[in-house]
Each structure stands twice: as structure tokens, then as C-alpha cells.
Image: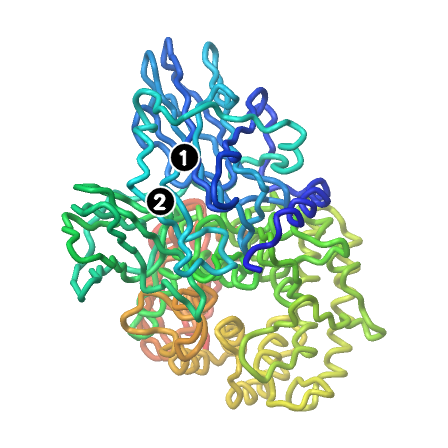
């Protein structure tokens, strides 16, 4: 049962392909006119999955154009060379934004063309199987279209193609079923000729056109890629290389996405394995690479990336190693913010949290880059909020792509599920989904990145989900739904019935704001009335006089529930002292919900407690020799799980006190809650430039140095109690600590 049966997946695809309307981009009809989907699948041997197909086209160019946009689509990934020069590494995206659809790239190929004959070569990697992050079309297919006056290049039967015999799947052991990518064996003895450039190799024949009606059903519509092309480095030497018996242990600079490279002199049939220290997670096999040598000197680079801190080359005796290197790849963003203070633990945590964000980004936001590479939206809410305070703005494109995918992957009853895109997982996690579409998810993205462009597209899906899929009881409270996976957080002492209304309340709050942006005042008023009733009923039913608790809940009091009562607005300030007492003795939230508890503590004026809790728990997800954060306390789960990084938000938004008042930080507040900290140096990336802040505290007095970006405004209260508005530029001022 490693993979879903192809027939079942194909039928499902046929049934649902036409039922989704929201789009991550536009299906640009002008980009696709006369080209055809092409394949060479029927030459495969030994199975349908993990096929590597070479395509090439000889093109005569009379005059090189100033611009020639090539539109390229593939199931599943592709690499492209023009005249032997590598142009695209890891092109294409895992399929979406709706089941049955795919993405395409737009690449200007004019700079790489020459007058006269040119060879365009494309290597297609077809996963051929579903996963937690991919829905297979059932077609190893490529489409290519480029046109300008006097020149057009169209994929059709005139292209040359062959299935490359070099590639096969590793079965020692196979990768786990969550991943659509297989671990790859490359056999250098199965030489196919220099198909990338030069004369036509003997074994290459003509490509096969996929009939239009078949392609329309299997491959669906094409949507322009909504995120940047991936970045790639040059080949780099390892930090260190140490031989241990038959293994060369190579240190990478940090946890990332890496392509191992080797240059060796070996005998025919020598097998070299390339594995990282993340080769197996929790008993689940992850991606590795294998290379079978031909006789003599040779070099090889794995096209499939591997994540980890260390790379291991397992060599048979007699292989002469000439060179070992790696190439780094990843989502095209960078760490633009920073947070430095006088607590080294917090500094180390912030840096590792930011690194974890980077390693959990590629086709989608990942839960982790090794075990499953899946876009679980509960994880994504934590990730996108952390990105607001740390990463360059290109990271926002990935969140927006995910919003469309979540809304398009819905079931007949309107329920939404993650991970998406997925071909093997169709279960809803109701509370995660409410968090996703609500105040911290969809609204968080819209507000902090100042982007309302998606709201009209997804609003009907959101409205149906909140008001048809979810039902209210006689008290106006949401009726509990277990969904496909009744999950609220990891760990124990989860009072789920008391937790659910907060997530529903925050989802209604987000929808009300979206409704007003669309001019739907009645929808907004209806939500506000529903929220008022939830607040009244919840306080009547769940408040015991000293804490919030479900009437039939028998375990230890849930700290998550108390925190969410603050964040949802259900708990009034008159109950903060009682809730603080509960949070002083109860600490059950795990890494997923930990940030919400911290935020509640700060909002109740207990920054000291929040910092103490961070110092207590953060060391158990931060191994000294690991550049990223663990999934769970006590170093359990994966060692690179970005849902653990919400402390980034706490530090920037609350300790430094930088929060948006108007979308995109055009107007922002400065209300530091420094707690026990005496010094903070912080930068927050915005579309206008970085907000920069330095704070030095003496007692309750804070000497602040602030850089307000061009076109922005900062609002704060100085030490004398004056409300100030600061325009762009550098300012020095004395403030109060907001304990």
C-alpha cells in the first residue's frame, strides 16, 4: 500500500478536476496555443514511477530576438539546457493549485540562443506516484511553447525523446510513502550519448503527442507559477571531510537543501551511496542518492536534493576520490530581519528558528524537509507569521500560493483539509483548519503583507466552510467536529471542547474583516452577532470561577484554553489575574501551540512569565550541534520543524514591541515589553525597507533608537506619557517599558 492505485487516483482526478474555481494565478490562454503535451512513457521498463525522460529539439534561429518567453510545464520536474548550458535547475512545481491542475514556468530564453542552429534539451523527472505534497496526473508529460515574430518553438512529435536507462529507484530500502520523490540510483554504465548537446544520439527517437482529450482530463488547466524560481549556488567544498572506514563524513555549513557531487576514479560496477544524517526519521526512510560507476575517471551530481547537516559518501574499497562538493538550492528568499539581545539563549533560538524557516520552504511551506515535505496548514500558520518578522518579502508568495491550495482542496461538504496538494491524504483537521482560515492564518497574511488580492476569490469557500460545514448548537457555540483527525496539539491534557470555540471565534473575526473589504456589511454584522453570543455562552458554560474548563473534562487544566480565551477576546481583563495563576502552574502546550501561550502572557502584562517559560522549554528543542529546531520537546520528532519557531514573533512583536497598525507596517506601533532584558537590537522587514530598533533599558526607562522606513509612520508613547508620531528617518527617544 505504498502508493494509491493509479486507476483510483485518475478517476478521482476526473471527478473533481472541474469543480474548483479559485486560482493562485491566471491560466494565461495567450501562453498556450499550438503546443502539445508530449511523452515517451511507453518505452519504460520495470514500473511506472520514477521515470527520467530526455527531450530535445534542434532550432534554427535567423535573428536572435530581444526577448523570447518560453512557457514550460511538466509532471513532475524538469531541467533545461540550451546549447549545452544549464538554464533551469529543478523547474516546475508539484501539481496544483487545485486537484487536476498544474503550474507552468515562464523563462526568457533569448539570452541563451545563438544565430544559426541551437539545441534545446529538457530532462523530465516524473514521480509517477502520489504523496503528501503531490497529486500525480498519471502522465510523464512535458509541454513547451515559445513564440515571437519570426520564431516559434512548440512541443510536438517533432521533438526527439528517449527514456534514460541510467535512472532507477532505490529499494534499499525505498523512500516512505509520504514522499512522491524516490531515492535515485544512477548507473553510469548505461551510457546514452551526449543528448544534451551535439549530434542526435542513436537511441533517441521521436516524442509522442498525448491526445488532447486525454491531456485535458489528466493534466488539467495550467496556472502560471506564483513563486520565484528556486535559487542555486555554485559547487562548494564541504566544511570538513573525515574518513571513517568506508564512509567519508562531510560537514555542511548548516541544515539546508543540498545536491551532493563527486569526482572519482573507479571500476565499473562500484556503487557509491550518498546519504545525509537525515536519511531516516522516526523509522521512516527519506531521500538518498546512489551512483553506480563506469570504468575510469568520472563525476556525478545528484539532481534530487537532500536535507541535512552532514553528508555521508559510502565508498567501496578501491575507489579513488578526486573531489567531493555540494550545491545548495532552495526557495528564493533570505533572512532580512534580526533579533539580538543580552540573553544568549534567545539569540541562539532566533537564529535557529530563522534557519528552520528556510529549510522548510520549497514548492510549499513544509512541515519538515525530510520525513514528508508536506504543507500541513497548522504548521504554515506558525511559519508565515514567523516569516513576517524575519524573511524577505518573497516568502509571502509561498503563503499566498498555499491559501489558494487550501481553499481548492475541499470536499463535497465544504470541509477543507491539509496537507495539500496531496494525492493520498483527504482527512480534515478541523481545529487546524479554523486556525488556518482565521485571524492568525489568512487574515495574518493579508494584514502583515498588505495583500487583499485573494480575498474575493476565496471568500465563497471560506463562507461556506464557516456557515454550512460548521453548525451551531442552541447556545450559539460550534458543534464539535472530529473530522478525519481529531487533533488540537501534540502532548496531553487537551481540553478540546473548550479549545474549539476560540478557533471558531477567530475565524469569524477574520471573515468579518474580509466581508467589509468586499462590501458585504450584512455578513460582517452577522458574524459579530454570532461572536457576541459565543462570548456570552462560553463564559456562562466554561468559566468555573477560577479557570476555563469543559464541564465533563477530567484531566489537568489546559493552559492552551486559558491562553486562547485571552487571544480570542472571550476573557475580559477582569479575569487576567485568575488566568495568570493557572498559567503559572500549568504548562502542557507543546511546540505547535507554545507561541499562543507566550502571546497571551505578554498581553496580560506577564512578560517575565513568558520569558521564564521560554528559558525553561526552548533548550529541549535546541541541540548544540543542530542548526535547526526540533519538532517536539526533548528532541523528539524531526530536527527541522518550523512550527517550533513562533518565538520569532514574540521577540519582534512583543519584546521589541513592533506591530503593524496599518497593513504592511505602513503605520506601526512601538510598545516594548522587555521583561528581564536590558538590550535589544531588532530589525523587521517590510515592503518599505527594514524597521530598525535598538533598545537599552535602565529600570523602566528605555533609550530607543528607531529607523522608520521611507513612507512609514511609527506611533509610540514616550517616557513623559506623550503620544508621538514619528515619520521616516532616524529618531532617538526615551520610552517606558510596557510591563
Looking at the rendered structure, which numbered label has been put on residue 123? 1
Res. 671 in view: no
Give left or right: position of 345 versus 249: right
- For image coordinates 50% across by 74% down, the residue present is 594
Left or right of 158 in this view: 85 = left
State the residue in front, 644 or 201: 201
Q: Residues within 10 Å of mark 2 (few under 14, many from 20)?
A: some
Q: How is the image coloured?
A: rainbow
Apparent side of residue 650 relative to residue 4 in the rendered image (left or right): left
Which image quadrant for residue 735?
Answer: bottom left
Q: Relative to 519, is 241 above or below?
A: below
Q: For residue 209, what is the image quadrant?
A: top right
Crowding at label 1, few (<14), some or many (≥20) Cα neighbours within 10 Å?
A: many
In the current view of this chain or complex, which residue is farthest to the right? Answer: 474
Residue 600, can we see it?
yes
Viewer-closest of 583 and 153: 153
Q: Position of residue 397 (x, y in %)?
A: 50, 46
Which residue is denoted by mark 2 in the rendering? 303
Badge number at residue 562: none
Residue at the (54%, 76%) spot, across then down:
490
| Residue 380 left/right relative to 203 | right
Q: In which quadrant of the rendered image does the C terminus lie?
A: bottom left
Q: Are marks 2 and 1 in contact (CB under 8 Å)?
A: yes
Q: Earlier in the sequence, mark 2 or mark 1?
A: 1
Residue shown at 38%/32% (left/top)? 80
Number of marks present in the image shown: 2
- Mark 2 secondary-structure assignment: loop
Residue 150 x %, y %: 46, 9
Q: Secondary structure at mark 1?
A: strand
Task: Give the x, y percent position of residue 99.
Answer: 64, 46
In x, y percent, where is residue 657? 44, 66
Amino acid at each position: 500500500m505504498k502508493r494509491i492505485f493509479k486507476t483510483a487516483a485518475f478517476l478521482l482526478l476526473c471527478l473533481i478536476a472541474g469543480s474548483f474555481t479559485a486560482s493562485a494565478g491566471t491560466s494565461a490562454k495567450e501562453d498556450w496555443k499550438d503546443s502539445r503535451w508530449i511523452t515517451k512513457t511507453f518505452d519504460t521498463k520495470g514500473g511506472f514511477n520514477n521515470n527520467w525522460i530526455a527531450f530535445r529539439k534542434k532550432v534554427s534561429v535567423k535573428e536572435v530576438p530581444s526577448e523570447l518567453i518560453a512557457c514550460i510545464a511538466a509532471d513532475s520536474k524538469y531541467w533545461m539546457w540550451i546549447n549545452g548550458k544549464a538554464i533551469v535547475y529543478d523547474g516546475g512545481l508539484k501539481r496544483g493549485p487545485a486537484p487536476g491542475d498544474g503550474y507552468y514556468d515562464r523563462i526568457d530564453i533569448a539570452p541563451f540562443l545563438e544565430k544559426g542552429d541551437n539545441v534545446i534539451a529538457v530532462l523530465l523527472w516524473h514521480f509517477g506516484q502520489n504523496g503528501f505534497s503531490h497529486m500525480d496526473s498519471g502522465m510523464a508529460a512535458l509541454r513547451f511553447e515559445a513564440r515571437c515574430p519570426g520564431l516559434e518553438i512548440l512541443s510536438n512529435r517533432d521533438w526527439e525523446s528517449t527514456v534514460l536507462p541510467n535512472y532507477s529507484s532505490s529499494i534499499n530500502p525505498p523512500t516512505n510513502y509520504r514522499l512522491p520523490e524516490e531515492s535515485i540510483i544512477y548507473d553510469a554504465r548505461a551510457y546514452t550519448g551526449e543528448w544534451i548537446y551535439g549530434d542526435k544520439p542513436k537511441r533517441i527517437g521521436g516524442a509522442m503527442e498525448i491526445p488532447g482529450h486525454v491531456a485535458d482530463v489528466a493534466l488539467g488547466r495550467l496556472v502560471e507559477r506564483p513563486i520565484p524560481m528556486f535559487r542555486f549556488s555554485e559547487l562548494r567544498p564541504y566544511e570538513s571531510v573525515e574518513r571513517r572506514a568506508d564512509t567519508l563524513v562531510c560537514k555542511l555549513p548548516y541544515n539546508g537543501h543540498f545536491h551532493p557531487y563527486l569526482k572519482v576514479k573507479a571500476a565499473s560496477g562500484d556503487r557509491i551511496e550518498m546519504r545525509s544524517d537525515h536519511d531516516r526519521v522516526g523509522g521512516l526512510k527519506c531521500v538518498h542518492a546512489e551512483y553506480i560507476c563506469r570504468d575510469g575517471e568520472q563525476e556525478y551530481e545528484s539532481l534530487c536534493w537532500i536535507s541535512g547537516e552532514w553528508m555521508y559518501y559510502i565508498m567501496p574499497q578501491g575507489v579513488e576520490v578526486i573531489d567531493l562538493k555540494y550545491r545548495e538550492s532552495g526557495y528564493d528568499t533570505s533572512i532580512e530581519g534580526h533579533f539580538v539581545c543580552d540573553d544568549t539563549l534567545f539569540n541562539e533560538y532566533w537564529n535557529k528558528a530563522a534557519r528552520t524557516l528556510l529549510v522548510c520552504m520549497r514548492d510549499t511551506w513544509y512541515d519538515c524537509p525530510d520525513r514528508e515535505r508536506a504543507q500541513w496548514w497548522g504548521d504554515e500558520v506558525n511559519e508565515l507569521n514567523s516569516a513576517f518578522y524575519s524573511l524577505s518579502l518573497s516568502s509571502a508568495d509561498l503563503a499566498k500560493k498555499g491559501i489558494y491550495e487550501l481553499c481548492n482542496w475541499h470536499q463535497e461538504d465544504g470541509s477543507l483539509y491539509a496537507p495539500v496538494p496531496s494525492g493520498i491524504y483527504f482527512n480534515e483537521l478541523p481545529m487546524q483548519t479554523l486556525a488556518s482560515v482565521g485571524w492568525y492564518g489568512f487574515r495574518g497574511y493579508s494584514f502583515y503583507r498588505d495583500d487583499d488580492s485573494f480575498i474575493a476569490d476565496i471568500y465563497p469557500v471560506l463562507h461556506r466552510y464557516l456557515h454550512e460545514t460548521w453548525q451551531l448548537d442552541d447556545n450559539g457555540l460550534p458543534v464539535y467536529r472530529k473530522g478525519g483527525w481529531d487533533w488540537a496539539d501534540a502532548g496531553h491534557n487537551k481540553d478540546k471542547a473548550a479549545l474549539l470555540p476560540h478557533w471558531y471565534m477567530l475565524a469569524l473575526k477574520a471573515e468579518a474583516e474580509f466581508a467589509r473589504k468586499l462590501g458585504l456589511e450584512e455578513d460582517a454584522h452577522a458574524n459579530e452577532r454570532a461572536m457576541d453570543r459565543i462570548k456570552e455562552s462560553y463564559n456562562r458554560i466554561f468559566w468555573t470561577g477560577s479557570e476555563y474548563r469543559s464541564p465533563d473534562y477530567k484531566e489537568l487544566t489546559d493552559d492552551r484554553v486559558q491562553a486562547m480565551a485571552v487571544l480570542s477576546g472571550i476573557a475580559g481583563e477582569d479575569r487576567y489575574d485568575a488566568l495568570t495563576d493557572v498559567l503559572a502552574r500549568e504548562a502542557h502546550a507543546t511546540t505547535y501551540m507554545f507561541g499562543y501561550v507566550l502571546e497571551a502572557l505578554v498581553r496580560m502584562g506577564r512578560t517575565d512569565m513568558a520569558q521564564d517559560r521560554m528559558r525553561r522549554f526552548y533548550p529541549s528543542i535546541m541541540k548544540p550541534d543542530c542548526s535547526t529546531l526540533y519538532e517536539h520537546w526533548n528532541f523528539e520528532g524531526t530536527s527541522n520543524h518550523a512550527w517550533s519557531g513562533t518565538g520569532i514573533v514574540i521577540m519582534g512583536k512583543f519584546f521589541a514591541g513592533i506591530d503593524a497598525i496599518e497593513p504592511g507596517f505602513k503605520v506601526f506601533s512601538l510598545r516594548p515589553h522587555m521583561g528581564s532584558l536590558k538590550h535589544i537590537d531588532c530589525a523587521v522587514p517590510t515592503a518599505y525597507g527594514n524597521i530598525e530598533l535598538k533598545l537599552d533599558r535602565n529600570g523602566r526607562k528605555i533609550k530607543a533608537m528607531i529607523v522608520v522606513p521611507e513612507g512609514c509612520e511609527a506611533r509610540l508613547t514616550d517616557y513623559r506619557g506623550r503620544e508621538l508620531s514619528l515619520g521616516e528617518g532616524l529618531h532617538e527617544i526615551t520610552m517606558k517599558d510596557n510591563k
